[in-house]
Image: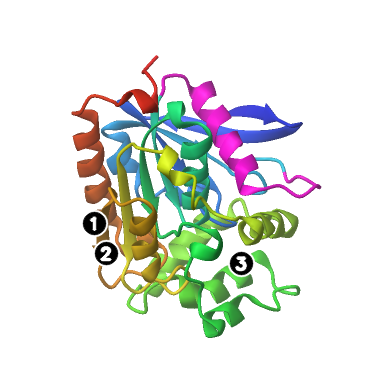
Amino acid sequence: MAFVTRSGHMVYWEQTGEGSPLLLIQGLGYPSDANWRVLPALTDRHRVIQVDNRGAGRSDVPKDPFSIADMADDAAAVIEAAGGWPAHVAGFSMGGLIAQELAVRHPHLVRSLILGCTSPGGDKAVPLSAEVAEQFTEWGNLSARDAAWRAARVCYAHSTRHEEIERDIEVRMKRPTPRPGYLGQLRAVGEYEGVAGRIDRWSGPVLAVHGSDDLIVPPANLDRITEAIPHADTVICHKAGHILMTDATEQLTDSMLAFLGQVDATPASPSTGAQV
């Protein structure tokens, strides 16, 4: 168990496995525990670094507003604390926004980017429909567990088994995200202007992975990412919803490992920094 302190706030991180470093960044309201399905495959080949974004998991819940940039700087501090960089960075949903911001703000720390079920952010993002957005309203009187089940209606594919969703929620409920932390992250996403006009500072390898049935971040966002990052490789996980780690566990991990293997076999460009 380890923490880094930034701006007076403690941010939790841990690492396991051996190989080139890989940082995993989870999405809105999710603790790093939610990585549980992909960890066995990833730690077999990589030193996997996990972080609890501020507001969730074992990290502090700030009283003051915070931003995607703040969480990107948190992630940078975690990479430095873990030692040995540049690191591969995989971000999912909100974590994908953090990963892109991290690459722009701290390019020397990032070896490659994996962007899962995410968008470029800001006005370049394709928003979710009004019907889906309604599933996230009027949560004030719901417990964390009830809110998770309500969100599950649109977060997973229709074919996802109830038992698998239940396993995910049981993992998350061991460390439920407090409402102030969730709202703080939600505000950060809503105020984020995206990386348009800045992402060209990042010239390293990029893999974008998306579910064909994603209702939270519509698949059209994959096109928006490739417009912003033309050299990005893409993978579509068919019949998968927003929670790729559950709906497409094997395809996701296979795609990640193949991409990371290719990157590790290629000399790093000067823009991504030097391994230390």
Quadrant of the rendered structure where residue 224 is? bottom left
Q: Which residue is outermost to the right?
A: 63
Mark in front: 2 vs 1: 2
Q: x%, y% of residue 55? A: 67, 48
Q: Are marks 3 and 1 in contact (CB under 8 Å)?
A: no
Magenta residues (range): 61-85
Q: Secondary structure at mark 1?
A: helix
Mark in front: 2 vs 3: 2
Amino acid of disc 2: Cys
- Is 211 in front, or is 156? 211
Q: Secondary structure at mark 2?
A: strand
Give the spatial CA distance, label 2 vs label 3.
Answer: 27 Å
In the rendered image, residue 76 lying in the magenta stretch gets the answer yes
Q: Quadrant of the C terminus?
A: top left
Q: Mark 3 — residue?
A: 145
Q: Quadrant of the N terminus?
A: top right
User: Which residue appears at 23% of the width and 42% of the height?
Assistant: 259
Can see residue 101?
Answer: yes
Mark in front: 3 vs 1: 1
Using residue 244 as the reference point, say whether residue 105 is left or right of it: right
Q: Mark 1 — residue?
A: 251
Using residue 106 as the reference point, say whether residue 184 is left or right of it: right
Amino acid of disc 3: Arg
Q: Mark 2 — residue?
A: 237
- Is 270 in front, or is 87? 270
User: Which residue appears at 42% of the width and 71% of the height?
Assistant: 218
Determine the main secondary structure of the stretch shown in magenta: helix
Amino acid of disc 1: Gln
Can see residue 58?
Answer: no
Mark 2 or mark 1, earlier in chain? 2
- Is 168 in front, or is 118? 118
